[in-house]
């Protein structure tokens, strides 16, 4: 048997050294067009962030060769951004493009599940919880990502698929003519530093500038929702190798962990960081992993993260992102000076000190100062929630956060908003195909705008639905009984068991025929009628209660009883089918709440060498962080209650390989 290999190369490191390229030059040198911005293209994408690149990759691969795409990013290289946790819709999209777990987990952390701990404000030290399991290893349920690395990865993937991604140049929408039609746009591009201004002819400008909404803001002011908004403040901390001192029940570092309380919640995300590594060296490492993926190199034969760092001259460490997302109607003490020097630091420490469990929890972590450069110890962002009323117009459309954003709870910023990026990418092909066959510029633009009507309607529904989802969760943070029995349960009942769109029906594998229909109907279950009914009821009953007061017992009981009534009807309808007793702790297969049921599936274990959490897969016998081997028993996923191989195949939670005409279960 011939062993498949991919050899490390140092193409970009050597090219940068020989040509004395800066970061933008070495990145741009990998474009099909090189460093020269073309005079004409079909689509110009303003912004080089994650939704820009998802749009570009999806469009390039949807109909290869049908569109010319140029992505323009003002920064000279991918930089720091918040938004680090993802869910299956993201990992399944990556899988569509050959970016499967055995390669991605060299760069990013594994996301094994979600744990939410609901703190009792009136009884300090008491809490409830709800914990869910993701999917087995090769079906990876999500990644914990450093955004700089994810955007660098997607830049290289886009370039491999014929997309030009230019760094160090900015679209100037104010000096551009954006009117639509075939090649009707004249886009002005300004260099980051000294250099000539250029113009590009295009048919469509895609606004992927996030909350800055560079083009969308010129067409409509952003929309705020009634009631409270949210502020977030965060920092970066060490990642403890020994988690035994963390007192929260069933705590696992590879879950996205949430500490929830009446004013909001805190996230705890353990992720690998490559900060401080040179761009050319990172490009060589990522190219090696992409070569491995294209060649199908088995996971255990790929260099582990620590080996990659040594081989390519990189910096590598595990860190923990910890932050709060709280309501902006919280009343803070008038004098906050005792909590720190900066606003973000003060508000962060205020909540640490307010809740005994959070204070104790934080003793396991040490603050990392200036991890992402000078002045980056503390971060703050206010009034997170907004919507763009208009997401397309003559010659342009918006994707991702340029359409709107709600709250980082359940990570909708990447995962749910991917529906906009991928849907828009496919509709762009349809729009320009119709426009090219039109008889005039006016007819061409009408054809384009008509094509995007369903996209406008979807975007108009998505953000309000996600906003209601977050308000539902926040009102249920008010009492620790509501989290596990109402909001936490419904998030998975509707988001995982969503009728007609359960992932097991697709064997946890989507393609170009199924991805967009799934993504626009999923929306975390926030558009499911039963979910919306319970959410509206909880918001209606709890929102009027002042934030500093407890929820009265009568209202608490009414919300739980109403939720149980709708839940029972939903389960009895047989529309919400899933392996609930394996997914959820404290729930049986009929979704009866049983606090004594503490078992569920387990698909990850902690490496005995480096302490990293490793996804369970019988073919992944080595830790992808340090390379230490583990036994077959340690590598096997645990289905609890036990699951036969035949049933596992039926549910799609394991895959089948066919070698020498002999089909065998992989584990």
Image (tube, rainbow, N blue to C red):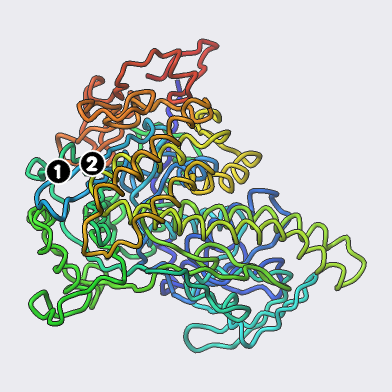
In-image side of 303 versus 69 (left or right): left
Q: Is residue 188 above or below residue 472?
A: below
Residue 385 placement: quadrant: bottom left
In-image side of 500 versus 241 (left or right): right
Q: Residue at x 76, y 73 (%)?
A: 180
Q: Secondary structure at mark 2?
A: strand
- Tag 2 near tag 1, CB within 8 Å: yes
- Measured from the top left, where is residue 86 in percent x and y? 40, 49
- Measured from the top left, where is residue 549 in percent x and y? 21, 61
Q: Nearer the viewer, residue 363 or 457?
A: 457
Q: Nearer the viewer, residue 128 or 647?
A: 128
Q: Is residue 610 above or below residue 434?
A: above
The quarter of the image holding the N terminus is top left
Q: Residue at x 90, y 71 (%)?
A: 440
Mark 1, residue position: 248
Q: Does residue 10 appear in the picture of this structure?
A: no
Task: Tell me if mark 2 has few (under 14), some (14-19) or many (20+) residues whose alpha carbon lies within 10 angstroms of its own.
Answer: many
From the viewer's perspective, is the residue at label 2 or at label 1 nearer?
2
Question: Which numbered circle lies on residue 129?
Answer: 2
Q: Secondary structure at mark 1?
A: loop
Question: Which numbered circle lies on residue 428?
Answer: none
Residue 56 placement: quadrant: bottom right
Q: Residue at x 16, y 45 (%)?
A: 127
Residue furthest out toward the right? 439
Task: Tell me if mark 1 has few (under 14), some (14-19) or many (20+) residues whose alpha carbon lies within 10 angstroms of its own.
Answer: some
- Measured from the top left, where is residue 330 in percent x and y? 25, 70
Q: Is residue 643 above or below residue 296?
A: above
Count of numbered circles in the view: 2
In-image side of 398 versus 366 (left or right): right
Q: CA distance from mark 2 to mark 1?
A: 9 Å
């Amino acid at each position: 048997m011939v062993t498949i290999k991919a050899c490390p190369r140092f193409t970009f490191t050597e090219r940068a050294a020989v040509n004395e390229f800066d970061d933008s030059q070495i990145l741009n040198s990998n474009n099909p067009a090189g460093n020269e911005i073309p005079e004409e293209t079909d689509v110009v994408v303003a912004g080089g962030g994650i939704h820009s690149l998802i749009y570009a990759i999806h469009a390039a691969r949807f109909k290869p060769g049908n569109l010319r795409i140029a992505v323009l990013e003002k920064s000279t290289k991918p930089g720091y951004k918040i938004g680090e946790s993802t869910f299956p819709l993201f990992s399944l999209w990556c899988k569509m493009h050959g970016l499967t777990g055995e390669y991605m987990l060299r760069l990013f952390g594994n996301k094994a599940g979600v744990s939410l701990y609901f703190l009792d404000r009136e009884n300090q030290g008491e809490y409830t919880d709800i914990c869910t399991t993701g999917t087995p290893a090769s079906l990876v349920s999500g990644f914990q990502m450093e955004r700089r690395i994810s955007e660098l990865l997607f830049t290289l993937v886009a370039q491999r698929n014929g997309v030009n991604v230019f760094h160090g140049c900015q679209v100037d929408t104010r000096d551009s003519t954006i009117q639509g039609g075939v090649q009707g746009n004249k886009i002005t591009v300004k260099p980051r530093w000294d250099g000539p201004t250029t113009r590009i002819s295009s048919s469509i400008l895609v606004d992927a500038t996030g909350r800055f909404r560079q083009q969308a803001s010129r067409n409509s002011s952003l929309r705020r929702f009634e009631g409270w908004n949210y502020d977030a403040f965060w920092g970066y901390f060490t990642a403890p190798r020994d988690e035994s001192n963390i007192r929260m029940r069933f705590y696992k570092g590879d879950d996205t962990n949430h500490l929830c309380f009446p004013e909001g919640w805190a996230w705890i995300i353990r992720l690998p960081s490559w900060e401080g590594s040179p761009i050319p060296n990172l490009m060589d490492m990522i190219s090696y992993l992409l070569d491995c993926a294209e060649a199908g190199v088995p996971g255990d034969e790929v260099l582990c993260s620590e080996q990659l760092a040594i081989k390519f001259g990189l910096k590598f460490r595990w860190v923990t992102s910890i932050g709060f997302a709280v309501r902006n109607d919280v009343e803070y003490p008038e004098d906050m000076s005792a909590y720190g020097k900066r606003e973000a630091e003060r508000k962060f420490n205020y909540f640490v000190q307010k809740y005994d469990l959070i204070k104790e929890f934080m003793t396991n972590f040490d603050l990392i100062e200036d991890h992402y450069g000078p002045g980056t110890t503390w971060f703050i962002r206010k009034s997170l929630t907004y919507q763009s009323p208009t997401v397309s117009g003559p010659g342009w459309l918006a994707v991702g956060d340029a359409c709107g954003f709600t709250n980082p709870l359940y990570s909708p910023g990447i995962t749910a908003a991917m529906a906009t990026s991928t849907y828009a990418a496919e509709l762009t092909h349809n729009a320009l195909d119709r426009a090219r066959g039109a008889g005039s510029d006016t007819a061409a633009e009408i054809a384009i705008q008509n094509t995007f009507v369903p996209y406008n309607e979807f975007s108009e529904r998505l953000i309000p639905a996600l906003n209601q989802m977050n308000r539902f969760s926040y009102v249920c943070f008010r009492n620790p009984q509501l989290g596990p029995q109402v909001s936490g349960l419904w998030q998975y009942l509707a988001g995982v068991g969503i009728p007609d769109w359960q992932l097991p029906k697709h064997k946890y594998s989507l393609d170009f025929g199924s991805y967009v229909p799934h993504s626009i109907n999923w929306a975390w279950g926030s558009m499911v009628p039963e979910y919306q009914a319970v959410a509206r009821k909880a918001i209606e009953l709890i929102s009027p209660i002042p934030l500093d007061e407890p929820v009265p017992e009568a209202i608490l009981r009414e919300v739980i009883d109403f939720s149980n009534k709708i839940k029972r009807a939903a389960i009895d309808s047989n529309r919400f089918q899933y392996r609930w007793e394996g997914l959820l702790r404290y729930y049986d297969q009929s979704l009866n709440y049983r606090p004594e049921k503490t078992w569920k599936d387990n698909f990850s274990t902690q490496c005995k060498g480096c302490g990293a959490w490793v996804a369970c897969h019988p073919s992944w016998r080595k830790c992808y962080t340090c390379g230490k081997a583990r036994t077959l028993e340690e590598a096997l996923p645990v289905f609890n209650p036990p699951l036969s191989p035949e049933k596992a195949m039926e549910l799609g939670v394991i895959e089948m390989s066919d070698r020498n005409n002999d089909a065998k279960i992989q584990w």
